[in-house]
Image: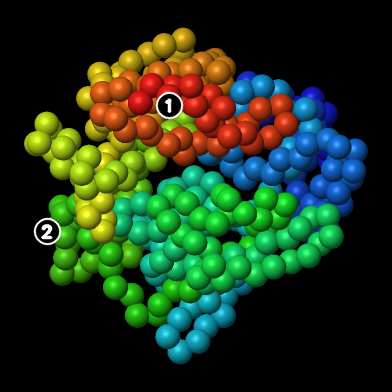
């Protein structure tokens, strides 16, 4: 059933009250391709979302929004691995719970990440020392106009920190499924600093379920539930800067948290924002979370997308002027016709460098 002039407020985790001309839940590829082709032929914009957990709507959408609910989890095995083929409309967190229930381990560090499976490889989702690139075998994509299906093997996905080839290429394609390869011989991933207490307390009897629960507890304390305070998790990516700038900043701020990746400094964007005195800052109903400055809250769930974007630009400008670091937005910005280049809005601020 297609709904006309439908509110997207409950379909995006920022709780932005915008409408779409039409909204439909898509449950199979035939329906997806048929609708996509129909609206493209009419020169109407189409947008596919899962949970709406990484988008910021600025205006009413003047086309068709398809809610991806193409589901299916298929398991096979070899001597050393579990092979999972997951359709893109499956909920990511429910997938993690499913694997643990069926004694297929490895994804526990990635628990409680919002969104659907289809969006996972686009951003190369990651948390607590793990990311999807550690387990991805392939990504299947489809051109909904001619129904051409391609399989992109892991080596060609160009996975990087919060990045992949799907953010830059295959714009006319849609992710329809993801293949994961999970070793049968499970080794706990406890390298992330947050696991120090966990290692000290239960290292003798660490289990995937304990790690899963530990991660869930951390995330629940750190990230507000979006139905209470609208948010999309981290608004900006953690910046990776040159060794020269990193060493310069370390002399100025000896307590600056960082990690080294091939001699480049990976900094905490939340720390940078906090140093600019934004913790707890509120403007036009948008608040910088007091526990994690990377998170912008729709504090009373009545702010507009532009309210949120304007505060993000203010933060971007302040961090840039203070540190010479220009943060990269992680959230996708959507206007009347679809995703837009965020630097349409951030570009003028960037010239201040």
Q: Is label 1 in a helix, a strand or a loop?
A: helix
* Identity of the residue drawn at 69% across and 35% down: 338
Q: For residue 24, which quarter of the picture?
A: top right
Quadrant, the N terminus: top right
**Residue beneath disc 1:** 350
Q: Is residue 219 left or right of residue 170?
A: left
Please say whether residue 307 is visible from this viewpoint.
yes
Q: Is label 2 in a helix, a strand or a loop?
A: helix
Q: Earlier in the sequence, mark 1 or mark 2?
A: 2
| Viewer-closest of 279 and 153 | 153
* Identity of the residue drawn at 46% across and 35% down: 329
As drawn, 242 above or below 180: above
| Viewer-closest of 292 and 165 | 165
- Residue most extreme to the bottom: 79
Disc 1 packing (10 Å; few <14; some 14–19; many ≥20): some
Residue 122, horizontal then vertical, whole percent? 54, 52
Q: Nearer the viewer, mark 1 or mark 2?
A: 1
| Viewer-closest of 260 and 183 | 260
Residue 163: which numbered mark, if any? none
Residue 200: which numbered mark, if any? 2
Residue 188, horizontal then vertical, whole percent? 28, 68
Residue 161, horizontal then vertical, whole percent? 40, 52
User: Would you say the residues marked 1 and 2 are in contact, meaning their CB atoms lie under 8 Å apart?
Assistant: no
* Identity of the residue drawn at 71% across and 40% down: 47
Please say whether residue 290 is visible from this viewpoint.
no
């Amino acid at each position: 059933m297609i709904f006309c002039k439908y509110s997207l407020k409950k379909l995006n985790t920022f709780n932005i009250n915008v409408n779409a001309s039409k909204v439909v839940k898509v449950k199979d590829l035939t329906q997806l391709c048929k609708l996509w082709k129909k609206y493209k032929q009419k020169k109407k914009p189409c947008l596919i979302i899962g949970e709406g957990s990484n988008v910021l709507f600025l205006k009413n959408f003047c086309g068709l929004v398809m809610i991806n609910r193409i589901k299916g989890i298929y398991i096979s095995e070899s001597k050393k691995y579990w092979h999972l083929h997951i359709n893109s409309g499956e909920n990511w967190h429910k997938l993690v719970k499913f694997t643990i229930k069926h004694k297929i381990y490895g994804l526990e560090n990635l628990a409680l990440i919002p969104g659907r499976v289809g969006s996972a490889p686009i951003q190369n989702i990651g948390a607590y020392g793990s990311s999807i690139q550690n387990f991805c075998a392939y990504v299947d994509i489809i051109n909904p106009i001619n129904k051409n299906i391609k399989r992109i093997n892991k080596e060609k996905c160009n996975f990087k920190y919060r990045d992949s080839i799907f953010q830059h290429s295959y714009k006319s394609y849609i992710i329809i499924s993801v293949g994961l390869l999970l070793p049968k011989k499970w080794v706990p991933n406890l390298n992330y600093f947050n696991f120090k207490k966990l290692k000290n307390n239960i290292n003798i009897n660490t289990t995937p379920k304990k790690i899963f629960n530990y991660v869930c507890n951390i995330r629940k304390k750190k990230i507000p539930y979006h139905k209470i305070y609208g948010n999309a998790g981290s608004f900006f990516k953690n910046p990776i800067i040159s060794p020269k700038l990193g060493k310069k900043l370390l002399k100025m701020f000896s307590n600056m948290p960082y990690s080294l990746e091939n001699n480049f400094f990976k900094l905490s964007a939340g720390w940078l924002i906090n140093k600019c005195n934004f913790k707890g800052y509120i403007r036009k109903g948008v608040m910088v979370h007091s526990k994690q400055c990377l998170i912008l809250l729709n504090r009373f769930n009545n702010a507009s997308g532009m309210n949120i974007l304007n505060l993000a630009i203010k933060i971007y400008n302040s961090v840039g002027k203070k540190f010479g670091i220009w943060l990269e937005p992680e959230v996708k910005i959507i206007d009347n016709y679809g995703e837009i280049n965020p630097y349409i809005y951030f570009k003028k601020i960037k010239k201040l460098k």
